[in-house]
């Protein structure tokens, strides 16, 4: 970083010390007084990243690059923020621009490989990761990236397992590697691996993040051995550790759903009939994690007219622009939806379709299975009124406990406490019931057999649940537009 004015240097010190609010106030005051100082804007973006306000960070770094296109450090940080926002294609563009300046730069090559991985260009990502690992043997992060990619790419299971075991033997690699092995449902840990995980988790010097990973891995390992008491103890410990670093407030989620109910009434939608982009390409699968959305996607995407994709971030990103930037202010969203014109809603729908085009492979329909989109069904209906919406619902006990046993990479903060989880499930059921009644886009039934699917295409797919809970066998029907 360039030599900073004293006030910004003090802000950088506060950032390094973890005093984020004080750092933000100091840096903002300087920028208000002195204008667009490039390193000040970059520093404020770094603070925003630490605070999790990624849209602010993206905006600030974009402004830095407009003023200084050759500021390579800012461009790299911009690319990493885009990756965190799961905007893989623009991140790839930034990585390519950096590599045109210095093709061998290791950090920029990692950014490039990560963007390729996010876009499903697995062979290219694997090639670059392996080159980087050959240059820096023993890099646990790179070894884990390779192992995860082998698993995602659909390689032989033993190849991915071997790669994870190599990572587990490296310093700082054990927690992530053992957790990944636990997430491979068919994998069974050896006595030696369980003993090693127990010892590593109990070590006084173990970082909280690694302890958390090891607790969830041990929970799965002991559950597989039917040692349920010890398994639950580790799951409970892992969840408590994770919950201790979060600031999740269930009241906020409940307030947001209540506001949705107040704004998105039947009369509200009736007054806006014909608004939005009229294309019917998207099929949204919404619900809670661990509810079978992946299975539903696999069934639907087996049809030649439907592309399977990912949990796409575009709806949350489009909604985020309408949310408050200051937490203490009265929420603008969803009340702001009433102010949007027909042309603005159509443009938002078209933007969604354009930004998701990179994930498609030519079929007329595609799936977006971001589960949390149930919170914004009203917004989806306004911008894409002919999209299909599937509510994938699992029996409450199976769903909530399934989430309690899962350590997520990010988000889903409601899952790390059983009371929070139950409360969130109840709010989800209430919220989706209101949406079905008011905008008539999804007809939900308990699911296992799909009897009628989106796009007017019919399946006759039958099966029986492998779950030990008979009550979690369910049936789903996909509602078609009236």
Image (cartoon, grey):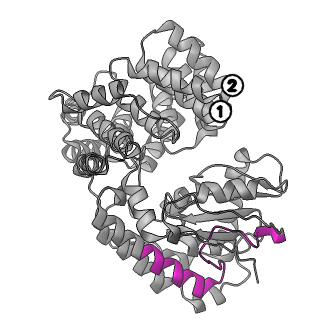
Residue 36 in the magenta stretch? The answer is: no
Q: Nearer the viewer, residue 115 or 431?
A: 431
Q: Residues within 10 Å of mark 1 (few under 14, many from 20)?
A: some
Magenta residues? 427-456
Quarter of the image where the C terminus is located: bottom right
- Please indicate whether residue 3 sits to the left or right of residue 144 in the image: left
Q: Position of residue 322 (x, y in %)?
A: 48, 65
As drawn, the residue found furthest toward the left would be 204
Q: Position of residue 332 (x, y in %)?
A: 42, 72
Q: Nearer the viewer, residue 251 or 462?
A: 462
Quarter of the image where the N terminus is located: top left
Gap in angstroms between the C-alphas marked 1 and 2: 8 Å
The residue lying at 25 percent from left, 33 percent from top is: 8
| Residue that mark 2 sits on | 123
Q: Are marks 1 and 2 in contact (CB under 8 Å)?
A: yes
The residue lying at 65 percent from left, 77 percent from top is: 442
| Residue that mark 1 sits on | 153
Q: Position of residue 163 (x, y in %)?
A: 51, 21
- Mark 1 or mark 2: whose residue is earlier in sequence: 2
């Amino acid at each position: 970083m360039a030599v900073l004015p004293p006030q910004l240097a003090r802000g950088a010190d506060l950032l390094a010390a973890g005093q984020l609010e004080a750092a933000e106030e100091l840096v903002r005051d300087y920028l208000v007084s002195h204008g667009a100082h490039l390193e000040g804007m970059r520093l404020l973006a770094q603070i925003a990243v630490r605070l999790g306000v990624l849209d602010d960070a993206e905006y600030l770094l974009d402004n830095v690059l407009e003023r200084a296109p050759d500021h390579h450090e800012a461009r790299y940080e911009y690319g990493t923020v885009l990756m965190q926002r799961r905007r893989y294609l623009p991140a790839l563009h930034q990585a390519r621009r950096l590599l045109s300046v210095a093709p061998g730069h290791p950090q920029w090559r990692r950014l490039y490989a990560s963007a390729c991985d996010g876009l499903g260009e697995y062979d290219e990502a694997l090639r670059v990761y392996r080159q980087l690992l050959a240059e820096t043997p023993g890099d646990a992060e790179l070894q884990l990236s390779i192992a995860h990619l082998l698993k995602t790419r659909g390689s032989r299971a033993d190849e991915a397992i071997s790669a994870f075991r190599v990572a587990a033997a490296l310093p700082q690699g054990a927690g992530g590697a053992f957790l990944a092995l636990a997430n491979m449902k068919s994998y069974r840990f050896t006595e030696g691996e369980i003993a090693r995980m127990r010892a590593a988790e109990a070590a006084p010097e173990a970082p909280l993040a690694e302890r958390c990973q090891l607790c969830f891995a041990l929970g799965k390992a002991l559950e597989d051995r039917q040692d349920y008491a010890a398994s639950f103890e580790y799951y409970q410990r892992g969840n408590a550790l994770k919950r201790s670093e979060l600031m999740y407030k269930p009241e906020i989620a409940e307030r947001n759903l209540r506001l949705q109910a107040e704004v998105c009434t039947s009369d509200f939608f009736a007054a806006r009939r014909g608004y939005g982009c009229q294309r019917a390409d998207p099929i949204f699968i919404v619900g809670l994690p661990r509810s079978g959305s992946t299975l539903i996607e696999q069934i639907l995407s087996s049809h030649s007219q439907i592309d399977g994709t990912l949990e796409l971030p575009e709806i949350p990103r489009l909604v985020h622009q309408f949310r408050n930037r200051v937490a203490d202010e009265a929420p603008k969203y969803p009340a702001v939806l009433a102010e949007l014109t027909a042309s603005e809603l159509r443009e938002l729908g078209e933007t969604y379709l354009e930004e998701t085009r990179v994930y498609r492979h030519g079929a007329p329909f595609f799936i977006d299975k971001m589960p949390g989109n149930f919170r914004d069904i009203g917004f989806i209906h306004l911008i894409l009124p002919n999209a299909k919406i599937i509510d994938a619902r699992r029996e409450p006990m199976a769903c909530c406990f399934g989430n309690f046993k899962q350590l997520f990479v990010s988000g889903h903060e409601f899952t790390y406490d059983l009371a929070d989880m139950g409360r969130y499930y109840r709010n989800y059921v209430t919220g989706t019931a209101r949406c079905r009644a008011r905008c008539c886009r999804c007809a939900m039934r308990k699911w296992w057999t799909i009897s009628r699917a989106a796009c007017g295409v019919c399946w006759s797919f039958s099966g029986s649940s492998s779950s030990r809970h008979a009550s979690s066998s369910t049936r789903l029907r996909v509602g078609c537009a009236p």
